[in-house]
Amino acid sequence: MLGGHLDVYSVPFFSNLLLAVRADHREVVVDLRALNFIDSSGLRILENEVTRARRAGRSFRVVNARGQVVTACGLTRLAQGGDQQAGRRGTL
């Protein structure tokens, strides 16, 4: 579960976390319930991961966005929740 902000300052940490999780899981679910702010760099890393997962035949979903985060995600295809493919699940 992500909490706080996903922004230009926290994206490098999140990117490294995604690399580790992606190596071990075919399905990744990112729970945003505790996230209270996301900027364009945060949206970009989530969007890129959706694309990367689709190309690799994996699943990457974003769930439980609230407030400003759901508004920002609603401006992109992240509002669709990503793919729903079977596989081992890693939840962030």
Image (cartoon, helix red, strand yellow):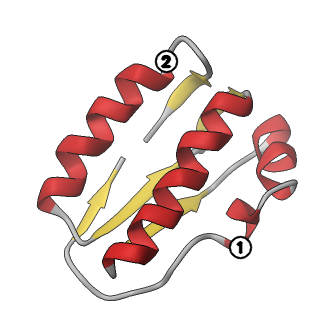
- Element class at badge 2: loop
**Callout 1: 10 Å neighbours few (<14), some, many (20+)?**
few
- Element class at badge 1: helix
Picture coordinates of residue 77, whole percent (x, y): 74, 65
Q: Residue at x 54, y 41 (%)?
A: 45
Instruction: List the single residue furthest toward the bottom.
Output: 86
Does residue 39 lie above or below 91 as drawn?
Answer: above
The residue that mark 1 highlights is 80
Instruction: List the single residue furthest toward the top.
Output: 9
Q: Residue at x 47, y 84 (%)?
A: 84
Does residue 49 lie above or below 4 as drawn?
Answer: below
77 left or right, relative to 19: right
**Callout 2: 10 Å neighbours few (<14), some, many (20+)?**
few
The part of the image, by quadrant, that contains residue 1 is top left
> In terms of depth relative to the viewer, which is nearer, 84 or 43?
43
The residue that mark 2 highlights is 10
85 left or right, relative to 42: left
What is the three-letter code of the residue carrying label 2? Ser
Picture coordinates of residue 81, whole percent (x, y): 62, 70
